[in-house]
Image (cartoon, rainbow, N blue to C red):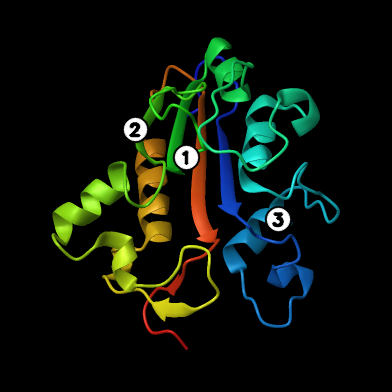
């Protein structure tokens, strides 16, 4: 991404799903090695006592989008398919002149065609079985069942190796699309991009050989 003429900074928000704050090697985790995130944390501000406004996925994402607590934004539990009308911070950035992009897992928007402030969602997907990632995976590996072809639960604790080449792993696919969007970002506008990843939320499918 290039710095626009008005010098406002580009913003990249990297968002994993269901990741504990202490699951970092920079937090001295005894097993996990996270060198890339560690590098980002070492070069910026690292908050050791930051907490989600809600431990449940949908209200947590709604709180992030609206900058409002669940008690005031109307989403206090795990409820699918609920539309809302509050302003979102991507929408506010768009109104301020930013070009806004969502890559990877969606924000539980409902209906799915409502952007909620994201102007570009061509590389986003609401779930594994629909959207741009599912379509690309089915086109590349027709009839293989997509992500669900591994046969493990999307909310279970069992694990299995990823069944396709690592370049098609959802994490790799999302990271590559985010990089492409950064390169494509219009130079005349500051750019905000959300790189949203499913991992480490189940299903647990590691790239390559599962050790």
**What residue is shown at x 50% (from left), y 78% (from top)?**
158
Of circles 1 and 3, the one toward us is 1
Rendered image: mark on residue 6: none
- Give neighbour class at mark 3: few <14, some 14-19, many 20+ (Cα, 10 Å): few
Q: Work out which residue is located at the far bottom of the displayed protein and give it.
A: 211
- Residue 150 position, x and y percent, is 33, 72
Taking 145 as reference, is 59 left or right? right
Q: Which residue is mark 3?
A: 41
Q: CA distance from mark 1 to mark 3?
A: 25 Å
* Disc with the residue nearer the chain's start (1 vs 3): 3
In the structure shown, which secondary structural element does the residue marked by tag 3 occupy?
A: helix
Q: CA distance from mark 3 to mark 2?
A: 26 Å
Picture layout, residue 11 above or below residue 31: above
**What residue is shown at x 58% (from left), y 21% (from top)?**
84
Rendered image: mark on residue 184: 2
- Residue 28 position, x and y percent, is 77, 75
Picture layout, residue 181 above or below residue 205: above
Q: Quadrant of the N terminus?
A: top left
Contact flag, marks 1 and 3 (Cβ < 8 Å): no
Rendered image: mark on residue 106: 1
Is residue 29 something that shows in the picture?
yes
Contact flag, marks 3 and 2 (Cβ < 8 Å): no
- Residue 199 position, x and y percent, is 52, 60
- Residue 126 position, x and y percent, is 41, 41
- Give neighbour class at mark 2: few <14, some 14-19, many 20+ (Cα, 10 Å): few
Q: Quadrant of residue 17?
A: bottom right
Taking 51 as reference, is 192 left or right? left
Of circles 1 and 2, the one toward us is 1
Taking 50 as reference, is 191 left or right? left
* Disc with the residue nearer the chain's start (3 vs 2): 3
């Amino acid at each position: 991404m290039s710095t626009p003429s008005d010098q406002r900074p580009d913003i990249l928000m990297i968002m994993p799903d269901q990741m504990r704050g202490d699951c970092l090697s920079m937090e001295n985790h005894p097993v996990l090695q996270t060198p890339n995130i560690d590098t980002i944390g070492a070069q910026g501000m690292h908050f050791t006592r930051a907490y989600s406004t809600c431990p449940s996925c949908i209200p947590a994402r709604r709180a992030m989008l609206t900058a409002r607590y669940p008690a005031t934004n109307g989403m206090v539990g795990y409820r699918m398919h609920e539309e809302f009308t509050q302003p979102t911070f991507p929408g506010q950035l768009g109104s301020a002149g930013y070009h806004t992009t969502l890559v990877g897992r969606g924000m539980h928007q409902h209906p799915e065609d409502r952007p909620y402030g994201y102007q570009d969602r061509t590389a986003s997907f609401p779930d594994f079985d629909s959207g741009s990632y599912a379509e690309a995976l089915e086109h590349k590996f027709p009839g293989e069942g997509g992500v669900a072809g591994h046969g493990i639960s999307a909310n279970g604790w069992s694990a299995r190796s990823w069944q396709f080449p690592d370049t098609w792993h959802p994490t790799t696919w999302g990271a590559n699309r985010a990089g492409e969007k950064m390169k494509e970002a219009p130079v005349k506008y500051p750019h905000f991009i959300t790189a949203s990843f499913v991992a480490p939320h189940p299903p647990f499918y590691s790239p390559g050989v599962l050790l």
